[in-house]
Image (cartoon, rainbow, N blue to C red):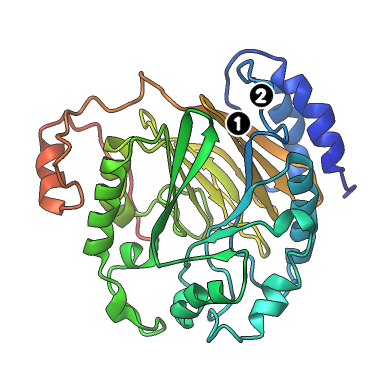
Protein backbone atom coordinates (compact mmCIF):
# COMPACT_ATOMS: atom_id res chain seq x y z
CA UNK A 1 0.00 0.00 0.00
CA UNK A 2 1.26 3.49 -0.82
CA UNK A 3 2.77 5.37 2.09
CA UNK A 4 0.91 8.61 2.80
CA UNK A 5 2.98 11.39 4.30
CA UNK A 6 1.78 12.54 7.73
CA UNK A 7 2.89 16.00 6.63
CA UNK A 8 0.33 16.02 3.83
CA UNK A 9 -2.32 14.57 6.07
CA UNK A 10 -1.86 17.03 8.90
CA UNK A 11 -1.29 20.11 6.77
CA UNK A 12 -3.61 19.26 3.91
CA UNK A 13 -6.59 17.32 5.21
CA UNK A 14 -6.83 18.69 8.74
CA UNK A 15 -7.45 22.37 7.90
CA UNK A 16 -10.29 21.40 5.61
CA UNK A 17 -11.84 19.30 8.34
CA UNK A 18 -11.48 22.00 10.93
CA UNK A 19 -13.23 24.49 8.67
CA UNK A 20 -16.42 22.39 8.55
CA UNK A 21 -17.85 23.94 11.70
CA UNK A 22 -20.46 21.45 13.01
CA UNK A 23 -20.30 18.32 15.12
CA UNK A 24 -20.58 14.69 14.09
CA UNK A 25 -18.92 11.34 14.64
CA UNK A 26 -18.31 8.77 11.91
CA UNK A 27 -18.81 5.04 12.21
CA UNK A 28 -16.49 2.55 10.56
CA UNK A 29 -15.62 -1.07 11.18
CA UNK A 30 -13.43 -3.18 8.95
CA UNK A 31 -10.09 -4.76 8.25
CA UNK A 32 -8.57 -2.48 5.60
CA UNK A 33 -7.96 1.20 6.12
CA UNK A 34 -8.52 2.22 2.51
CA UNK A 35 -12.07 0.84 2.57
CA UNK A 36 -13.13 3.38 5.18
CA UNK A 37 -10.90 6.43 4.98
CA UNK A 38 -12.88 8.41 2.34
CA UNK A 39 -16.16 7.94 4.21
CA UNK A 40 -14.59 8.81 7.53
CA UNK A 41 -12.97 11.98 6.27
CA UNK A 42 -16.10 13.07 4.45
CA UNK A 43 -18.23 12.70 7.59
CA UNK A 44 -15.80 14.25 10.06
CA UNK A 45 -17.03 17.62 11.32
CA UNK A 46 -15.57 19.53 14.24
CA UNK A 47 -16.30 22.77 16.08
CA UNK A 48 -14.54 25.91 14.97
CA UNK A 49 -11.44 25.38 17.05
CA UNK A 50 -8.76 25.59 14.41
CA UNK A 51 -5.86 25.34 16.82
CA UNK A 52 -6.39 21.57 17.22
CA UNK A 53 -3.13 19.73 16.47
CA UNK A 54 -1.24 22.97 15.98
CA UNK A 55 2.28 22.73 17.46
CA UNK A 56 1.61 25.15 20.31
CA UNK A 57 -1.23 23.22 22.01
CA UNK A 58 -1.29 20.09 24.18
CA UNK A 59 -0.74 17.23 21.71
CA UNK A 60 0.40 13.71 22.55
CA UNK A 61 0.57 10.15 21.16
CA UNK A 62 -1.00 6.92 22.45
CA UNK A 63 0.35 3.46 21.56
CA UNK A 64 0.15 0.03 23.15
CA UNK A 65 1.11 -3.64 22.88
CA UNK A 66 4.31 -2.82 21.07
CA UNK A 67 7.33 -4.62 22.53
CA UNK A 68 8.28 -7.20 19.87
CA UNK A 69 11.93 -6.42 19.07
CA UNK A 70 10.92 -4.26 16.11
CA UNK A 71 9.00 -7.02 14.33
CA UNK A 72 5.31 -7.24 13.33
CA UNK A 73 5.34 -3.63 12.06
CA UNK A 74 6.61 -2.25 15.37
CA UNK A 75 9.46 -0.41 13.68
CA UNK A 76 7.19 1.01 10.95
CA UNK A 77 4.76 2.27 13.57
CA UNK A 78 7.64 3.87 15.45
CA UNK A 79 8.85 5.70 12.33
CA UNK A 80 5.41 7.13 11.63
CA UNK A 81 4.95 8.07 15.28
CA UNK A 82 8.15 10.07 15.02
CA UNK A 83 6.96 11.87 11.88
CA UNK A 84 3.51 12.70 13.23
CA UNK A 85 4.93 13.57 16.64
CA UNK A 86 7.34 16.06 15.08
CA UNK A 87 4.64 17.70 12.99
CA UNK A 88 2.27 18.24 15.93
CA UNK A 89 5.02 18.88 18.50
CA UNK A 90 3.90 15.95 20.66
CA UNK A 91 4.51 16.74 24.33
CA UNK A 92 4.60 13.12 25.54
CA UNK A 93 3.65 9.54 24.66
CA UNK A 94 1.24 7.29 26.55
CA UNK A 95 1.92 3.55 26.51
CA UNK A 96 -1.18 1.45 27.24
CA UNK A 97 0.75 -1.61 28.41
CA UNK A 98 2.08 -4.97 27.26
CA UNK A 99 5.30 -3.10 26.82
CA UNK A 100 7.44 -6.23 26.45
CA UNK A 101 6.45 -9.59 25.01
CA UNK A 102 5.97 -12.23 25.91
CA UNK A 103 7.02 -12.27 29.54
CA UNK A 104 7.81 -8.67 30.43
CA UNK A 105 11.34 -7.80 31.53
CA UNK A 106 13.43 -9.36 34.28
CA UNK A 107 15.48 -6.32 35.30
CA UNK A 108 16.54 -2.84 34.20
CA UNK A 109 19.40 -4.54 32.33
CA UNK A 110 17.14 -6.89 30.37
CA UNK A 111 18.15 -6.71 26.66
CA UNK A 112 14.50 -6.18 25.73
CA UNK A 113 14.87 -2.57 26.84
CA UNK A 114 17.29 -1.96 23.99
CA UNK A 115 15.72 -4.29 21.41
CA UNK A 116 12.11 -3.24 21.90
CA UNK A 117 12.30 0.33 23.21
CA UNK A 118 15.54 2.28 23.07
CA UNK A 119 16.59 1.10 19.59
CA UNK A 120 13.09 1.37 18.11
CA UNK A 121 11.67 4.70 19.25
CA UNK A 122 14.67 6.75 18.16
CA UNK A 123 12.98 9.75 16.49
CA UNK A 124 13.61 13.11 18.18
CA UNK A 125 9.86 13.59 18.71
CA UNK A 126 9.73 10.38 20.76
CA UNK A 127 12.40 11.39 23.27
CA UNK A 128 9.94 13.18 25.53
CA UNK A 129 8.38 11.40 28.50
CA UNK A 130 6.62 8.03 28.03
CA UNK A 131 3.83 7.64 30.59
CA UNK A 132 3.45 3.87 30.83
CA UNK A 133 1.18 1.33 32.48
CA UNK A 134 1.56 -2.39 33.08
CA UNK A 135 -0.17 -4.95 30.89
CA UNK A 136 -0.89 -8.59 31.59
CA UNK A 137 2.28 -9.68 29.77
CA UNK A 138 4.32 -7.27 31.88
CA UNK A 139 3.11 -9.11 34.98
CA UNK A 140 4.75 -12.27 33.64
CA UNK A 141 8.12 -10.63 34.24
CA UNK A 142 9.27 -8.45 37.13
CA UNK A 143 6.91 -5.48 37.15
CA UNK A 144 9.20 -3.66 39.57
CA UNK A 145 11.87 -3.52 36.86
CA UNK A 146 9.64 -1.26 34.78
CA UNK A 147 9.25 1.07 37.74
CA UNK A 148 12.97 1.01 38.48
CA UNK A 149 13.90 1.74 34.86
CA UNK A 150 13.09 5.38 35.58
CA UNK A 151 16.50 5.52 37.30
CA UNK A 152 18.15 4.64 33.99
CA UNK A 153 16.01 6.34 31.36
CA UNK A 154 15.02 10.03 31.43
CA UNK A 155 11.99 9.42 29.20
CA UNK A 156 10.50 6.22 30.69
CA UNK A 157 7.94 7.14 33.36
CA UNK A 158 6.24 4.63 35.65
CA UNK A 159 6.70 5.81 39.23
CA UNK A 160 4.33 3.18 40.62
CA UNK A 161 1.85 0.53 39.48
CA UNK A 162 -0.79 3.25 39.43
CA UNK A 163 -0.23 6.98 39.60
CA UNK A 164 -1.40 10.40 38.37
CA UNK A 165 0.00 13.28 36.37
CA UNK A 166 -1.51 16.73 35.93
CA UNK A 167 -0.82 18.75 32.78
CA UNK A 168 -1.59 22.36 32.02
CA UNK A 169 -3.78 22.55 28.90
CA UNK A 170 -3.79 26.35 28.83
CA UNK A 171 -3.51 29.18 31.33
CA UNK A 172 -6.78 28.27 33.06
CA UNK A 173 -7.34 24.59 32.21
CA UNK A 174 -5.79 21.52 33.78
CA UNK A 175 -6.09 17.86 32.83
CA UNK A 176 -5.71 15.03 35.32
CA UNK A 177 -4.34 11.81 33.84
CA UNK A 178 -4.87 8.72 35.99
CA UNK A 179 -2.78 5.66 35.11
CA UNK A 180 -4.11 2.30 36.33
CA UNK A 181 -2.81 -1.24 36.70
CA UNK A 182 -5.82 -3.11 35.32
CA UNK A 183 -4.61 -6.72 35.44
CA UNK A 184 -5.52 -7.07 39.15
CA UNK A 185 -8.89 -5.45 38.41
CA UNK A 186 -9.64 -7.54 35.32
CA UNK A 187 -8.68 -11.03 36.48
CA UNK A 188 -10.94 -13.07 38.76
CA UNK A 189 -7.92 -14.35 40.62
CA UNK A 190 -4.16 -14.48 40.07
CA UNK A 191 -2.96 -17.10 37.63
CA UNK A 192 0.24 -19.07 37.84
CA UNK A 193 1.92 -17.25 34.97
CA UNK A 194 1.93 -13.94 36.87
CA UNK A 195 4.63 -12.97 39.36
CA UNK A 196 4.32 -11.11 42.67
CA UNK A 197 0.53 -11.35 42.69
CA UNK A 198 0.58 -10.83 46.44
CA UNK A 199 0.99 -7.15 45.56
CA UNK A 200 -2.29 -6.92 43.63
CA UNK A 201 -4.77 -5.64 46.25
CA UNK A 202 -7.45 -4.47 43.76
CA UNK A 203 -9.64 -3.01 46.51
CA UNK A 204 -6.90 -0.59 47.52
CA UNK A 205 -6.43 0.52 43.92
CA UNK A 206 -10.15 1.14 43.44
CA UNK A 207 -10.37 3.13 46.67
CA UNK A 208 -7.38 5.20 45.58
CA UNK A 209 -8.94 5.81 42.14
CA UNK A 210 -12.26 6.97 43.57
CA UNK A 211 -10.60 9.26 46.11
CA UNK A 212 -8.20 10.69 43.53
CA UNK A 213 -10.95 11.55 41.06
CA UNK A 214 -13.31 12.88 43.74
CA UNK A 215 -10.69 15.26 45.10
CA UNK A 216 -9.65 16.63 41.70
CA UNK A 217 -11.15 19.79 40.27
CA UNK A 218 -9.34 19.42 36.93
CA UNK A 219 -11.43 20.34 33.89
CA UNK A 220 -10.37 17.15 32.10
CA UNK A 221 -10.15 13.73 33.74
CA UNK A 222 -8.60 11.08 31.52
CA UNK A 223 -7.91 7.52 32.66
CA UNK A 224 -5.41 5.11 31.09
CA UNK A 225 -5.28 1.35 31.63
CA UNK A 226 -4.28 -1.75 29.74
CA UNK A 227 -7.54 -3.70 29.55
CA UNK A 228 -10.46 -2.33 27.51
CA UNK A 229 -13.81 -2.04 29.23
CA UNK A 230 -15.85 -2.07 26.02
CA UNK A 231 -14.33 -3.78 23.00
CA UNK A 232 -15.13 -5.02 19.50
CA UNK A 233 -12.78 -7.92 18.93
CA UNK A 234 -12.62 -11.42 17.52
CA UNK A 235 -10.98 -12.46 20.80
CA UNK A 236 -12.34 -10.27 23.59
CA UNK A 237 -15.71 -8.87 24.54
CA UNK A 238 -16.96 -6.38 27.09
CA UNK A 239 -15.25 -6.93 30.44
CA UNK A 240 -17.89 -7.43 33.16
CA UNK A 241 -15.47 -7.02 36.05
CA UNK A 242 -14.28 -3.64 34.79
CA UNK A 243 -17.81 -2.56 33.94
CA UNK A 244 -18.80 -3.31 37.53
CA UNK A 245 -15.76 -1.78 39.22
CA UNK A 246 -14.62 1.11 37.02
CA UNK A 247 -17.60 2.45 35.06
CA UNK A 248 -19.57 3.72 38.12
CA UNK A 249 -16.49 5.57 39.33
CA UNK A 250 -15.79 7.05 35.91
CA UNK A 251 -19.36 8.22 35.36
CA UNK A 252 -19.81 9.76 38.79
CA UNK A 253 -16.41 11.38 39.11
CA UNK A 254 -16.41 13.23 35.80
CA UNK A 255 -14.11 11.13 33.63
CA UNK A 256 -14.44 12.03 29.96
CA UNK A 257 -12.19 9.46 28.28
CA UNK A 258 -10.54 6.09 28.92
CA UNK A 259 -7.60 4.88 26.80
CA UNK A 260 -6.64 1.19 26.80
CA UNK A 261 -4.69 -1.38 24.79
CA UNK A 262 -4.73 -5.20 25.11
CA UNK A 263 -6.69 -5.73 21.90
CA UNK A 264 -4.27 -5.39 19.00
CA UNK A 265 -6.09 -2.85 16.85
CA UNK A 266 -7.61 0.65 17.00
CA UNK A 267 -11.12 1.22 18.35
CA UNK A 268 -13.55 3.82 19.69
CA UNK A 269 -16.66 2.92 21.70
CA UNK A 270 -19.39 4.96 23.34
CA UNK A 271 -22.20 3.09 25.13
CA UNK A 272 -25.59 4.72 24.71
CA UNK A 273 -26.09 7.44 27.29
CA UNK A 274 -22.52 7.21 28.56
CA UNK A 275 -20.62 10.42 29.38
CA UNK A 276 -17.36 8.52 28.85
CA UNK A 277 -15.68 7.67 25.54
CA UNK A 278 -13.61 4.48 25.41
CA UNK A 279 -10.61 4.21 23.09
CA UNK A 280 -8.40 1.21 22.32
CA UNK A 281 -4.89 1.87 21.02
CA UNK A 282 -3.17 -1.49 21.19
CA UNK A 283 -1.86 -1.70 17.63
CA UNK A 284 1.82 -0.96 18.23
CA UNK A 285 2.89 -4.17 16.51
CA UNK A 286 0.99 -7.44 15.95
CA UNK A 287 -2.69 -6.99 15.00
CA UNK A 288 -5.96 -8.80 15.72
CA UNK A 289 -9.36 -8.82 14.00
CA UNK A 290 -12.32 -6.66 14.96
CA UNK A 291 -16.10 -6.97 15.13
CA UNK A 292 -18.87 -4.43 15.50
CA UNK A 293 -20.85 -4.12 18.74
CA UNK A 294 -23.75 -1.82 19.65
CA UNK A 295 -21.22 0.51 21.27
CA UNK A 296 -18.75 0.62 18.38
CA UNK A 297 -18.05 3.89 16.59
CA UNK A 298 -14.82 2.67 15.02
CA UNK A 299 -12.73 -0.52 14.94
CA UNK A 300 -9.95 -1.35 12.50
CA UNK A 301 -7.35 -4.08 12.25
CA UNK A 302 -4.18 -2.18 11.41
CA UNK A 303 -0.86 -1.58 13.10
CA UNK A 304 -0.84 2.00 14.27
CA UNK A 305 -1.40 4.52 17.05
CA UNK A 306 -3.47 7.53 18.05
CA UNK A 307 -2.60 11.20 18.14
CA UNK A 308 -4.55 13.36 20.58
CA UNK A 309 -5.01 17.11 20.76
CA UNK A 310 -6.35 18.38 24.08
CA UNK A 311 -7.86 21.85 24.23
CA UNK A 312 -10.01 23.67 26.74
CA UNK A 313 -13.37 22.51 25.40
CA UNK A 314 -12.66 19.51 23.14
CA UNK A 315 -10.40 16.48 22.87
CA UNK A 316 -9.50 15.43 19.33
CA UNK A 317 -8.38 11.91 18.42
CA UNK A 318 -6.78 10.93 15.12
CA UNK A 319 -5.89 7.28 14.41
CA UNK A 320 -3.00 6.52 12.06
CA UNK A 321 -1.90 3.24 10.55
CA UNK A 322 1.78 2.38 10.23
CA UNK A 323 2.16 3.82 6.72
CA UNK A 324 1.04 7.26 7.86
CA UNK A 325 -2.52 7.15 6.58
CA UNK A 326 -5.18 8.81 8.72
CA UNK A 327 -7.84 6.14 9.25
CA UNK A 328 -10.14 7.74 11.81
CA UNK A 329 -10.84 11.17 13.24
CA UNK A 330 -13.21 12.21 15.99
CA UNK A 331 -13.57 14.59 18.90
CA UNK A 332 -15.33 14.64 22.26
CA UNK A 333 -16.45 17.75 24.15
CA UNK A 334 -15.35 18.38 27.70
CA UNK A 335 -18.91 18.88 28.93
CA UNK A 336 -21.95 17.03 27.61
CA UNK A 337 -24.94 18.03 29.78
CA UNK A 338 -27.26 15.65 27.94
CA UNK A 339 -25.06 12.66 28.78
CA UNK A 340 -23.69 13.35 32.22
CA UNK A 341 -25.17 11.28 35.01
CA UNK A 342 -27.94 12.87 37.05
CA UNK A 343 -27.16 10.73 40.10
CA UNK A 344 -26.80 12.68 43.30
CA UNK A 345 -23.55 11.39 44.74
CA UNK A 346 -22.18 12.86 47.92
CA UNK A 347 -18.49 13.68 47.66
CA UNK A 348 -17.84 11.38 50.62
CA UNK A 349 -19.50 8.39 48.95
CA UNK A 350 -16.96 5.61 48.38
CA UNK A 351 -17.81 4.21 44.96
CA UNK A 352 -14.98 1.68 45.18
CA UNK A 353 -17.04 -0.28 47.72
CA UNK A 354 -19.14 -2.92 45.87
CA UNK A 355 -21.98 -2.66 48.40
CA UNK A 356 -22.14 1.12 48.04
CA UNK A 357 -22.21 0.78 44.26
CA UNK A 358 -24.96 -1.82 44.43
CA UNK A 359 -27.08 0.34 46.74
CA UNK A 360 -26.55 3.37 44.52
CA UNK A 361 -27.49 1.51 41.35
CA UNK A 362 -30.53 -0.12 42.94
CA UNK A 363 -32.01 3.32 43.49
CA UNK A 364 -31.96 4.03 39.75
CA UNK A 365 -34.04 2.84 36.87
CA UNK A 366 -32.44 -0.23 35.31
CA UNK A 367 -31.50 0.61 31.73
CA UNK A 368 -30.06 -2.86 31.11
CA UNK A 369 -26.39 -3.76 31.04
CA UNK A 370 -26.31 -5.67 27.75
CA UNK A 371 -24.62 -8.95 27.08
CA UNK A 372 -21.49 -9.33 29.16
CA UNK A 373 -19.13 -12.16 28.45
CA UNK A 374 -15.86 -12.95 30.17
CA UNK A 375 -12.86 -12.08 28.01
Which is nearer the eye, 266 or 370? Answer: 266
Q: In this view, does 96 lie to the left or right of 345?
A: right
Q: Residue at x 28, y 73 (%)?
A: 189
Mark identifier at residue 44: 2
Relative height, residue 318 to residue 96 (above, below): above
Residue 133 lies, in percent from the top left, at 48, 63
Which is nearer the eye, 170 or 61? Answer: 170
Q: Which residue is drawn at 70% across and 78% down?
A: 114
Q: Is residue 178 left or right of residue 292?
A: left
Which is nearer the eye, 141 or 347? Answer: 347
Check disc 1 and report its element: helix, strand or loop: strand
Mark identifier at residue 330: 1
Q: Residues within 10 Å of mark 1 (few under 14, many from 20)?
A: many
Answer yes or no: do the residues labelled 2 and 1 have beta carbons within 8 Å?
yes
Residue 27 lies, in percent from the top left, at 59, 31
Check disc 2 and report its element: helix, strand or loop: loop
Is residue 322 something that shows in the picture?
no
In the displayed orientation, state which residue is furthest to the right. Answer: 2
In the displayed orientation, state which residue is furthest to the top. Answer: 21
Which of the 4 image quarters holds residue 337? top left
Q: Earlier in the sequence, mark 2 or mark 1?
A: 2
Residue 237 lies, in percent from the top left, at 43, 53
Is residue 245 something that shows in the picture?
yes
Residue 97 lies, in percent from the top left, at 52, 64
Amino acid sequence: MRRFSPLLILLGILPALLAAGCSGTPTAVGTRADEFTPEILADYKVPEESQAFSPDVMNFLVVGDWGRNGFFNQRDVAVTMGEVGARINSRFTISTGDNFYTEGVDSIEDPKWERSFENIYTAPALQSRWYSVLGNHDWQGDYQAQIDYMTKSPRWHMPARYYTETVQVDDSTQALFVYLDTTPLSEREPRGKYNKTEDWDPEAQLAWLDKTLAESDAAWKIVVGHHPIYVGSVRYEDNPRLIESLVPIFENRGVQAYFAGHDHNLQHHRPEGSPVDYFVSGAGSLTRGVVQTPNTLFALRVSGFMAVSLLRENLYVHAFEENGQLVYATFIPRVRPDLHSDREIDEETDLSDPKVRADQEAAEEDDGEGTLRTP
